[in-house]
């Protein structure tokens, strides 16, 4: 055997002189038990009966599929009180669900409905007593101009006598007014949306300077590129001297 270096050789000699000690007490106990088992087995005294007793026994005396009786926990009054309680619970849950659904739908509708400023713009009330005969008034309704014309008797006669059947957008004057003296129209040119000028044009009605459309005293297109008559909005007369547009 080749001689070891001096430090390694001295360490090896110390290890050979001292016996190896176990790493922990548990390991020592395990070693002892293993030794005892070996002695027992070698002596033929090993007990073949399993020492573990299972709590789950499958016999007729104690079947594992038997459902335990909970009779002593059941109500003494019978099924009636149980059903009453069930009905009460179902009814309560139904009421709570209905209340929640109602609140949800209500919140949704409130959010979707028009705000107060939008509702205020939806209808416009006009005092007709302030508009003299033969004059125009322009008001703003839903962001658009609306013409209100207090027509004279001559203008009414001219509008009614016009041969409307031959016009580009044929319409009698009686279909465009509720009261002959009040002509109410949306003041937006039906060509490209300019605002026509009142008391102008070849027919004494309105003239659109953008491309030269002429409207008569009933707001019907008579000349120029506009394809349709000026639109008539929804309106009504709640009182003799008042009109509500919208
Ligand atoms: S927009 Fe009025 S004529 Fe073109």
Image (cartoon, rainbow, N blue to C red):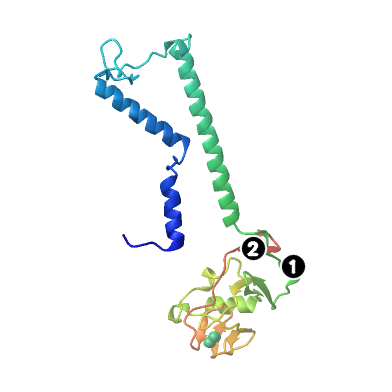
- Residue at image position (50%, 88%) is 223
Q: Nearer the viewer, residue 90 or 75?
A: 75
SS at circle 2: helix
On whether ligand 1 comes within 8 Å of the CB at mark 1, the answer is no
Q: Is residue 134 above or below residue 244?
A: below
Q: Which residue is label 2 attached to? A: 118
Toward the viewer: 115 or 134?
115
Residue 38: horizontal and vertical position, in percent? Answer: 29, 27
**Does 51 appear above or below 19?**
above
Q: Residue 129: which numbered mark, if any?
A: 1
Left or right of 126? Residue 43 is left
Residue, x 30% and y 13% (percent of image)?
A: 62
Q: Nearer the viewer, residue 63 or 159?
A: 63
Q: Residue at x 54, y 33 (%)?
A: 95
Q: Which is more N-terminal, label 2 or label 1?
A: 2
Classify 58 as above or below 124.
Answer: above
Q: Residue 245, located in which quarter of the rendered image?
A: bottom right
Numbered circles on residues, count: 2
Q: Quadrant of ligand 1?
A: bottom right
Which image quarter is the N terminus in?
A: bottom left
């Amino acid at each position: 055997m080749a001689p070891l270096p001096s430090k390694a050789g001295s360490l090896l000699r110390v290890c050979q002189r001292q016996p190896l000690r176990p790493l922990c007490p548990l390991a020592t106990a395990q070693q002892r038990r293993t030794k005892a088992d070996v002695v027992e087995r070698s002596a033929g005294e090993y007990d073949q009966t399993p020492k573990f007793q299972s709590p789950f026994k499958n016999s007729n005396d104690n079947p594992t599929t038997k459902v335990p009786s909970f009779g002593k926990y059941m109500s003494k009054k019978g099924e009636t009180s149980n059903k009453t309680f069930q009905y009460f619970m179902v009814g309560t849950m139904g009421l709570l669900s209905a209340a929640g659904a109602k609140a949800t739908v209500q919140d949704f509708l409130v959010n979707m409905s028009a705000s107060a400023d939008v509702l205020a713009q939806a209808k416009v009330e006009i005092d007709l007593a302030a508009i003299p005969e033969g004059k125009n008034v322009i008001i703003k309704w839903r962001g658009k101009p609306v013409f209100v014309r207090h027509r004279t008797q001559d203008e009414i006669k001219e509008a009614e006598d016009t041969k409307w059947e031959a016009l580009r957008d044929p319409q009698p004057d009686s279909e465009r007014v509720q009261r002959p003296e009040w002509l109410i129209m949306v003041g937006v040119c039906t060509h490209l949306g300019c605002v026509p000028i009142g008391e102008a044009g070849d027919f004494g009605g309105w003239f659109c300077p953008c491309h030269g459309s002429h409207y008569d005293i009933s707001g019907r297109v008579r000349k120029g590129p506009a394809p349709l008559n000026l639109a008539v909005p929804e309106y009504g007369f709640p009182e003799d001297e008042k009109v509500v547009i919208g």
